[in-house]
Amino acid sequence: MRYIDNKALSIIAAIFTLTACSPQSTSMSGISFPEDAKIAEALQTQLKNDPNSATARELVRTLGGEKGSLKFLIKDVIYRQGAYEVHYDAALVMGQAGTDSLKALYAGMVPEADRTRLTPDTRETYEAWLKNQAETLQKDPARKAAGDALASTVELLNQCYQDAKPGAEIPVMQGLGALLSPARSGLYAEKLPRADITVRCLPM
């Protein structure tokens, strides 16, 4: 019969302790990590108050409707000497039917001088104008790239939104980053530039 000395027993005990505790732990080496809900709340506050996010807020209203919102999906949190680097994705929670979103968006993409002459006031009317504009641009070698981009954008947006129902979650951005710092009022979020950001289901 083989015997295990005390040192070996200590090592085995330590391994089992780490294996049992690590997956459930919200801290490491005495560092506490904020809950996902608190992180998402800080990101929502940043979106609401940041003057540079005005265009993003308007796009959320256009595509999601008055009851639409952004949902932040936390992927990773990294401790950075008193602050937290957060990696996350964003999804648009629809507050209206996707067809209504497309109508509002396409109408805004048509120059006002042309829009006022278009009838009837439907998504199909504005979409047809945009497709015709894309074809016109594609015939000009100097503007073909712009025409291709417009045609691709309309096709992509239709795929993303035409069948969307209120409450549906549409992935719009992946690979986002933010730096969260402790503040008296809670967590303060600042955007972090990242090279691997992917934009989906948004006009380009």
Image (cartoon, helix red, strand yellow):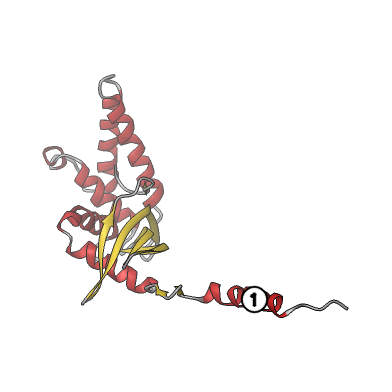
Splitting the image into 4 quarters, where does residue 182 fall? bottom left
Q: Position of residue 15 (x, y in %)?
A: 63, 73
Q: Which residue is mark 1?
A: 16
Q: Dividing the picture into quarters, in which one does residue 70 lie?
A: bottom left
Determine if residue 120 is in view.
no
Q: Is residue 32 left or right of residue 179?
A: right
Amino acid type at mark 1: Phe
Query: From where the camera sits, is residue 55 visible?
Result: yes
175 or 171: nearer the eye?
Answer: 175
Residue at 20% over, 46% down: 108
Q: Image point 29% across, 38% down: which residue?
A: 128
Left/right of residue 37 with respect to residue 136 in the rendered view: right
Instruction: Report helix, strand or loop for mark 1.
Output: helix
Q: Is residue 4 above or below residue 139?
A: below
**Residue situated furthest top in the rendering:** 141
Image x and y of residue 91, in percent = 37, 59
The C terminus: image quadrant = top left
Q: What quarter of the picture does the N terminus occupy? A: bottom right
Q: Residue at x 17, y 56 (%)?
A: 54
Taking depth in this image into account, of 71 and 75 the one nearest to the observer is 75
Closer-to-camera residue (97/47): 47
Check disc 1: other Cα within 10 Å, few if <14, some if 14-19, many if 20+: few
Q: Is residue 115 toward the left or the right of residue 6 in the image?
A: left
The quarter holding residue 119 reads top left
The residue sitting at the left extreme is: 113
Report x, y in % for residue 99.
Answer: 33, 53
